[in-house]
């Protein structure tokens, strides 16, 4: 049973959520260490990548144990639970749903029986050929009568777990090397059997994955922050198209596909923690430079620059530096808002976003304010923020966005709204400005954003801004978040729905919006 933590819930308006971010994965091979507790702290550092569920699997060399539940890492685990997870290998996961609904059956790590034991798998990303993979399972073994899929798991992770079952006499590594080239889409996998820890990253390197060294072992994680938290030193990124195995013989590396790097630019804009480094570039420095470039491209006369905390803070620092306008904190953020399973009353709903943010009237009143945010999705959150600033006495509110207009959904691990729901597809910049009630609105240019990452354009995926998808997509009837939700049919290809994985922009705020936040300014 998921345990509440006494904190207010984000989920005040379940139907109103922003794009959901990526999941977080963590793996450790460390004999003599408390691997479950190391994994707990690693997942704690990756909590920003997934807040729906959390789970840890451990192995003592002969048996795999797993515990997972809905909620934050701190809600799912306590010391008593962690003490039951014994061993020298562990795999952990914190989830936002990519393929498959948000319920317990889809929590990870997933478990699967194989020809030579058990496999536990954690996945960050989203596969685009889930229908094809399901058909492979049907062809090989018929409709599953046991395992994750039979138990109601409708995620693409369950499909991969089932396909790792292997055959007698074939090693896990050989099975993985045969399967990995058949997967399409974005994936950063961390998985294990009873004796070995494995990791793999798709040939495009869409989602991050790093390798670290402990005094007595090795760590694999989505971001370097998790390595630092558990005291591991950063060794390198797992390369696109690379598969590694870690056991008592050390680290073995194999390549399963030709690298064609197309890392997600939104990791730099929003998804990753500011202290992350991706492809050798500091995420924090990228965001500060985006703010500087935003100021160069879109200057305005104002008295103060404030961020929408926390995602807009580095860009606001850069904007203030470049423009010469003083930086200030215009909002106080409630850092203690977590998730419980308490349904909010109408009174709480009416409080809306003020449960999470409060404007500092002493800073705002009588000022011309530049407010910097990372992105606009539906526009509802910005509408609420602009209204709060006006209520606090702002004379003018100028909204600056450190990414271009989001116009396309993501199929590689971010749960953006559909094209129809994305405000940039239905309105020009001037119309969006009027809709949110701002005095002006400006976005960074695509070139400005890319230059800030210091990555070549051809090594980045910018699909959510450009509609150019580096990984080929299947037909619409074989694509979607709910593809594997059976709903009375045995064939997942007959179902379609929205898509995504990681918590996206405004996901923490949009659930707090009230009805007035969703109404356009007139």
Image (cartoon, grey):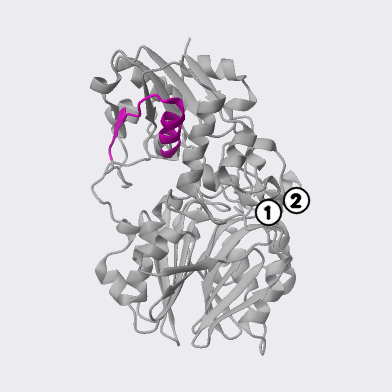
* Element under disc 2: loop
Residue 28 lies in what quarter of the image?
bottom left
- Observer-nearest of 225 and 336: 225
- Do tag 1 and tag 2 residues touch (Cβ < 8 Å)? yes
Q: Which residues are magenta?
A: 314-334
**Residue 212 appears at what percent x and percent y?**
46, 70
Give the number of the disc on residue 472: 2
Q: Is residue 327 magenta?
A: yes
- Asked whether, in this view, residue 153 is left or right of residue 335, the answer is right
* Badge 1 or badge 2: first in the primary sequence: 1
Residue at image mark 1 = 128
* Element under disc 1: loop
Residue 301 lies in what quarter of the image?
top left
Badge 1 density bin: few <14, some 14–19, many ≥20, Cα 10 Å: many
Question: Residue at point 67% right, 81% down?
Answer: 174
Question: Residue at point 31% right, 63% down?
Answer: 77
Residue 147 lies in what quarter of the image?
bottom right
* C-alpha distance separating marks 1 and 2: 8 Å
């Amino acid at each position: 049973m998921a345990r509440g933590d006494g904190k207010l819930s984000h989920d005040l308006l379940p139907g109103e959520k922003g794009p959901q971010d990526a999941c977080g994965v963590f793996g450790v091979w460390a004999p003599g260490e408390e691997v479950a507790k190391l994994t707990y702290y690693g997942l704690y550092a990756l909590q920003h990548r997934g807040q729906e569920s959390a789970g840890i699997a451990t192995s003592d060399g002969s048996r795999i144990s797993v515990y997972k539940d809905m909620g934050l890492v701190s809600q799912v685990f306590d010391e008593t639970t962690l003490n039951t997870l014994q061993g020298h290998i562990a795999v952990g996961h914190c989830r936002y749903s990519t393929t498959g609904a948000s319920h317990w059956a889809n929590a990870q790590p997933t478990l699967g029986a194989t020809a030579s034991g058990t496999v536990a798998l954690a996945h960050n990303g989203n596969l685009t050929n889930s229908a094809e993979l399901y058909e492979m399972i049907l062809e090989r073994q018929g409709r599953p009568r046991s395992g994750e899929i039979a138990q109601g798991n409708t995620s693409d992770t369950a499909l991969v777990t089932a396909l790792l079952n292997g055959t007698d006499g074939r090693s896990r590594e050989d099975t993985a090397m045969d399967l990995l080239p058949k997967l399409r889409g974005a994936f950063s996998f961390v998985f294990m059997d009873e004796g070995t820890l494995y990791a793999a990253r798709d040939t495009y390197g869409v989602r991050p994955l790093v390798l670290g060294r402990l005094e007595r072992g090795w760590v694999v994680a989505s971001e370097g922050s998790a390595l630092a938290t558990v005291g591991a030193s950063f060794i390198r990124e797992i390369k696109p198209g690379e598969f590694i195995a870690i056991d008592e013989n050390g680290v073995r590396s194999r390549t399963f596909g030709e690298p064609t790097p197309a890392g997600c630019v939104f990791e730099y804009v929003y998804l990753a923690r500011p202290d992350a480094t991706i492809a050798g570039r500091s995420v924090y420095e990228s965001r500060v430079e985006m703010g500087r470039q935003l100021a160069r491209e879109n200057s305005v006369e104002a008295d103060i620059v404030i961020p929408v905390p926390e995602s807009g803070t580095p860009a606001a620092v850069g904007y203030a530096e470049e423009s010469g306008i003083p930086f200030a904190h215009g909002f106080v953020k409630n850092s203690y808002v977590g998730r419980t399973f308490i349904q909010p009353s109408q009174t709480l709903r009416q409080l809306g976003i003020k449960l999470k943010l409060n404007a500092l009237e002493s800073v705002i009143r009588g000022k011309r304010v530049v407010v910097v945010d990372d992105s606009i999705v539906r526009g509802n959150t910005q509408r609420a923020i602009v209204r709060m600033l006006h209520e606090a006495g702002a004379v003018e509110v100028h909204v600056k966005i450190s990414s271009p207009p989001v116009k396309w959904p993501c199929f590689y691990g971010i749960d953006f709204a559909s094209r129809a729901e994305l405000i940039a597809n239905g309105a020009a910049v001037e119309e969006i400005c009027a809709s949110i009630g701002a005095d002006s609105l400006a976005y960074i240019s695509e070139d400005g954003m890319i230059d800030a990452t210091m990555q070549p354009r051809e090594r980045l995926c910018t699909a959510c801004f450009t509609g150019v998808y580096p990984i080929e997509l299947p037909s619409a009837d074989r694509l979607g978040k709910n593809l594997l939700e059976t709903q009375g049919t045995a064939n997942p290809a007959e179902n379609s729905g929205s898509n995504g994985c990681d918590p996206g922009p405004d996901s923490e705020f949009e659930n707090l919006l009230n009805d007035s936040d969703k109404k356009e300014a007139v």
